[in-house]
Amino acid sequence: MRFAIGVVAAVLLIIFALNAGRMLLVDGPQPSDLILVLAGETDRRPAHALELLHQGYGKHVLIDVPAETRIYELSQLDLAQKYVRDLPDAASVSICPIRGLSTREETHDVEKCLTAEDGARILIVTSDFHTRRALSIFRHELRSKSFSVAATHDPTEFGSRWWTHRQWAKTCSGEWLRTIWWNAVERWE
């Protein structure tokens, strides 16, 4: 009997491991009032949000930018403001200063920025591996809003066949730890 339980447990573990990367991914953008770009991956997320804006998924883009982060003598906020000013779509893009270090804390900073924005339907743009947890956190923390999510893919950071690249394995295991922590502890605080 113990052997049979061990075999079943091993098979379930293998099935989970083979699908762990795919289980993190949600990519279901819906037409929204606002496209929200979560802080991070500044070379990919804002560009993807602008593509979605041009495709009609939203009317305005709000980019989360860490308020305290500096890159040499420049603040990331100053760099983001210059980036937005130089865009052809600058009138459709604004910045939301973020002070929180976790996705949950980011929701509270975003909530403050949303007071100046119209609409209740928000399309979140984030890294593919972060989509499921980000969507869960925003739906939990900002219940008066409706959220969908669009995945931004960076092949150097993550892939659903996580076991084939060292960086993908690190990203997958780190995101699963954060997802478990969110579901087991943080969402109940």
Image: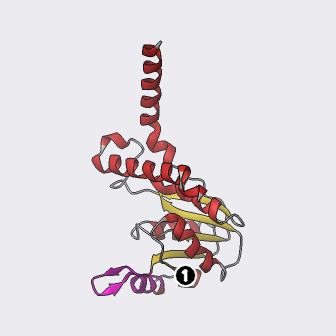
Depth order, front residue of 87/157: 157
Residue 114, given in percent of the width and then of the height, sits at 64, 77
Residue 54 in sight: no
Callout 1 secondary element? strand
Left or right? Give the position of 151 relative to 162.
Answer: right
User: Amino acid under label 1?
Assistant: Ser
* Range drawn in magenta: 67-84
Residue drawn at (44%, 30%) of the image:
13
Q: Does the magenta stretch include residue 80?
A: yes
Residue 183, given in percent of the width and then of the height, sits at 55, 50
Q: Is residue 76 magenta?
A: yes
Residue under label 1, please give it.
94
Residue drawn at (55%, 75%) of the image:
109
**The C terminus, quarter of image:** bottom right
Q: In which quarter of the image is residue 142?
A: bottom right
Residue drawn at (43%, 56%) of the image:
153
